[in-house]
Image (spheres, rainbow, N blue to C red):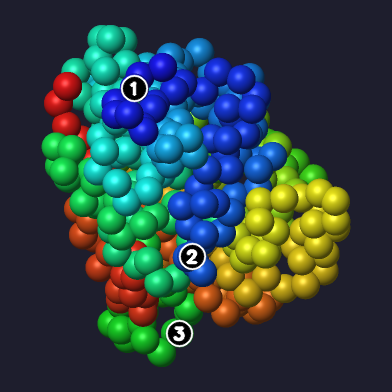
Amino acid sequence: MLDTAASLAIRPVETPADMKTFIRLANDIYADDPNYVAPLEYELAARLDAEKNPSIKGFPRKLWIAEKDGKPAGRIAALVNRAYIERHGDNAGHFGFFESVDDPGVAKALIDAASHWLKSEGVEKILGPFNNTINEESGLLISGFDTPPYVMMPHGRPYYARLMEENGFQKAVDMHALKYIPRPQLMPEKRQRFIDKALANPKVSFRTIDMKNFDREIHTLVNIFNDAWFDNWGFIPFTEDQIDHMAKELRPIIEPYNVVFCDYDGEPAAFSLVLPDVNYVTRDFGGKLLPFNWAKLIWRLKLQPVPRARMPLMGVVRKLHRRPVGTALAYKMIMIAQEENVSRGVVHSELSWILDSNESMLSMLLDMGAEIYKTYRMYEKPL
């Protein structure tokens, strides 16, 4: 145990009781925040379990809890993601699951613990937050605190950015979330004509996911994603184990209209994925499913329209990126997916996240009537 002051201690997570404290700690941090949505404890526990979550299996990792005056006051995780290092040639260790009271001493002790451990593992930089990887929750919220987070998006306290910067972190990249409800009249007429002309090609066809071959379809989706996002900042391709895990996680909440594919010249060329906002469904659960919230969850997901949805993934294969049909497909995939969901009761949706450097995508979404309403920052510093 590392004593940083008479009343402050940092200790590693070592027991099931420690893990329970780690999982529940954020509830106290956000006790006065009406926009906080507690994650389902069983789901977060599974994400933190390397035997259940293939995205972190086999990688060095450590978790810590801060205690001040004998009470939990913060938490942090550190991970050496070998897949990231090999993919990008960037010898960076990652941190995540950061939560803290507004106390510079607590934040410094947590960050120091993660930094010292990562340095002992041989990395040269600390980068994050990642909860656990870029394919899960990423980024520190720096604007847009007045609305609740969508499914698989982090929340935060306004003072977190200050705590990061006081500890020497600098911006690596910013990512935006955009709110969007399809309003066709907002699409510039010239842009709509371009889309219609580019897609009036007999080689182009659209369809929704084949639920009878769900696992195979998710593999198709991820194969497109791995190709489309190949050059993105921080990108790590999904492995076969991760794809199988994703299929298992998505199956209970996906309906056919949530996934749209486009085939071009007989081959899968683009997709869009929309998730019902499970955070909206579980907002009053306090992170608990038992004894009766599991029944509410099923009822709200399956028997009532969920009025909020998030598009976390959309992609067009790289060979079409610089062609008019590729640009038109990106527009059309978003339009079809959103219209399908709006027709089933969605009244508010989020497109997230988009890198601040992805000017073409941001321009396209703003063209369609979307608005940037949240920004997340990835921080880095040398060790």
Residue sitting at x 59%, y 50%: 39
- 152 or 268: nearer the eye? 152
Residue sitting at x 66%, y 51%: 287
Under mark 1, the amino acid is Asp
- 295 vs 233, left or right, is right
Cα distance in 3D space between marks 2 and 1: 29 Å
Q: Is residue 302 above or below residue 216?
A: below
Cα distance in 3D space between marks 3 and 2: 36 Å
Is residue 99 in view from this perspective?
A: yes
Residue 242: x, y in percent? 57, 28
Residue assigned mark 1 = 3
Residue 254: x, y in percent? 69, 54
Residue assigned mark 3 = 183
Query: Closer to the N terminus: mark 3 or mark 2?
Result: 2
Query: Closer to the N terminus: mark 1 or mark 3?
Result: 1
Under mark 2, the amino acid is Asp
Label 1: which secondary element: strand
Q: Is residue 122 above or below residue 128?
A: above
Label 3: which secondary element: loop
Quadrant housing residue 83: top left
Residue 189: x, y in percent? 32, 86
- 252 vs 18, left or right, is right
View extreme (bottom): residue: 185
Residue assigned mark 2 = 32
Query: Closer to the N terminus: mark 2 or mark 1?
Result: 1
Under mark 3, the amino acid is Arg
Determine which of the numbered discs, if any, sits on residue 239 in the image: none
Q: Quadrant of the C terminus?
A: top left
- 24 vs 96, left or right, is right
